[in-house]
C-alpha cells in the first residue's frame, strides 16, 4: 500500500474504512519508532536523549523498549 492509497482511505466517507486506515497508521508509526529507537541505542544514545526526541520521558521510552525487549 502506498502513501497515496493510505491517504485516500483516510479521507473515506465510510467510518470503517477510515478507522482501519488509522489503525494501519498507528501500526506503521510503532514500527518506525521501534526501528529508530533501536538505531539510536546502537549509536549510543541515552534513554533521556531518545525520550526528548520523542517528546516523552526517559522512563516511558525505557519501559517500552528497554529491558526484556
Image: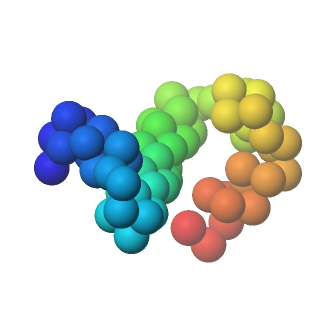
Hey, which quadrant is residue 66 in on the image?
Answer: bottom right
Hey, which quadrant is residue 56 in on the image?
Answer: top right
Quarter of the picture containing the C terminus is bottom right
Q: What percent of the width, then of the height, locates residue 54?
A: 67, 34
**Which residue is depicted at the point 20% across and 35% down?**
4
Q: What percent of the width, then of the height, locates residue 55?
A: 75, 33
Front residue (pair 67, 30): 30
Q: What percent of the width, then of the height, locates residue 25?
A: 41, 51
**Which residue is depicted at the point 63% across and 30% down?**
45
Front residue (pair 20, 49): 20
Question: Which colouring convention does the figure follow?
Answer: rainbow
Front residue (pair 64, 23): 23
- Asked if residue 35 can be seen in this view, the reply is no
Compared with 61, 46 (above or below) is above
**Which residue is depicted at the point 36% across and 62% down?**
14
Name of the residue lying farthest toward the front: 13
- In the picture provided, is 32 more to the left or to the right than 62? left
**Which residue is depicted at the point 37% across and 47% down?**
10
- Asked if residue 62 can be seen in this view, the reply is yes
Amino acid at each position: 500500500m502506498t502513501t497515496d492509497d493510505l491517504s485516500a482511505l483516510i479521507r473515506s466517507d465510510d467510518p470503517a474504512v477510515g478507522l482501519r486506515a488509522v489503525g494501519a497508521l498507528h501500526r506503521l508509526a510503532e514500527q518506525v519508532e521501534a526501528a529508530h529507537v533501536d538505531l539510536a541505542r546502537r549509536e549510543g544514545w541515552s534513554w533521556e536523549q531518545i525520550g526528548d526526541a520523542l517528546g516523552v520521558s526517559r522512563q516511558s521510552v525505557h519501559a517500552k523498549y528497554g529491558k526484556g525487549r
